[in-house]
Amino acid sequence: MPYQPHHRDAVRTIYADTAFFGAPVEAYFDDRGLFADLGIDPYLEHYPDYAWVAESEGTAVGYIVGCPRGDGEIRRHNLARLPRILGRLAAGRYRVGRKTLSYVWDQAIAAARGELIEIRSALYPANLHINLLPTRRGHGLGSALLRAYLARLSSDGVPGVHAVTTDRNEAAVHLYRGFGFTVLAETTTAAWKRHVGGPLRLIAFGLRLSVGTSAQETVQNP
Ligand SMILES: CC(C)(COP(=O)(O)OP(=O)(O)OC[C@H]1O[C@@H](n2cnc3c(N)ncnc32)[C@H](O)[C@@H]1OP(=O)(O)O)[C@@H](O)C(=O)NCCC(=O)NCCS
């Protein structure tokens, strides 16, 4: 179903509960509140019409969010939100410990080495993030969420969408391939080495969309 403001807390919780390759974020980040404020709130605040929620017995069990203009736009929103976030940090409302500092360090090193992928292509401008709670995976909910998002992008005339994942996210790789996504870029990164014991493959998938079509007809080049 379309995202509603009352879903916000549940979506933030799922975001944090699935952030470590489908497992809780506490594996590498100290404060799930800060993680959600930076990572999911920009989507919920600025692009609520591009968010959907999967519900089970009246409770949110998964979501898809995205931005039709991609990561750069989300970064701009986060920059504008930075004073608010720094204010909360100064007020001691976030825990920033060893895990968070190691994470920021590892990401910075990976970025400096060119090991992170960002797709900046006019052909695939939109991005997406999709996650389900573990008990609800493998039942078609992810496919339904993705179909809803792609239909919305198509009806808005967005020419394409991309999604970055890893070779450890097997269900996500199957999901994207099943919808006709193709690999736009791939790289090996050591960014997660201290948590997964070695390097892994980052994979950016992309899909061109047909403009102004129905949910069943969104894929241009399957
Ligand atoms: C990725 C995710 C959203 C997919 O949603 P889902 O509801 O589990 O997927 P679906 O049931 O719609 O299945 C989609 C496809 O993936 C396949 N699939 C599902 N689970 C799988 C698994 N564990 N391993 C391999 N393939 C899998 C399905 O068979 C289906 O393929 P098909 O259409 O060829 O039959 C969900 O599994 C999830 O949240 N995973 C953990 C977090 C994650 O990786 N998020 C994505 C980050 S980029």
Image (cartoon, grey):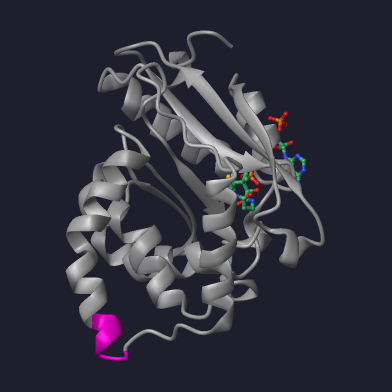
Percent coordinates x, y for residue 104 in the rendering:
51, 65
| Foreground of the two, 37 or 95 | 95
Query: Residue 2 vs residue 146: left or right?
Result: left
Dominant SS in magenta? helix
Residue shown at 36% from the left, 71% from the top: 9
Percent coordinates x, y for residue 36 in the rendering:
40, 67
Rendered image quadrant of residue 4: bottom left
Rendered image quadrant of residue 167: top right
Which residue extends farthest front? 112
Percent coordinates x, y for residue 157 in the rendering:
27, 17
Q: Please state the quadrant of the image where ligand 1 appears.
A: top right
Q: Could one spot residue 132 in this view of the protein?
A: no
Asked if 182 appears above or below 35 in the picture, the reply is above
Which residue extends farthest right? 197
Residue shown at 32% from the left, 46% from the top: 2
| Foreground of the two, 218 or 184 | 184
Percent coordinates x, y for residue 92 in the rendering:
31, 91
Rendered image quadrant of residue 164: top right
Query: Residue 19 vs residue 149: left or right?
Result: right
Q: Could one spot residue 39 in this view of the protein?
A: yes
**For the C terminus, which image quadrant?**
top right
| Foreground of the two, 4 or 190 | 190
Query: Residue 215 vs residue 73: left or right?
Result: right
**Total count of labels:** 0
Residue shown at 25% from the left, 42% from the top: 49
Asked if 1 appears above or below 21 in the picture, the reply is above
| Foreground of the two, 189 or 62 | 189
Residue stretch rendered in magenta on the structure: 88-92
Residue shown at 47% from the left, 46% from the top: 129
Query: Residue 45 vs residue 65: left or right?
Result: left
- Queried whether the magenta region covers residue 107, the answer comes back as no
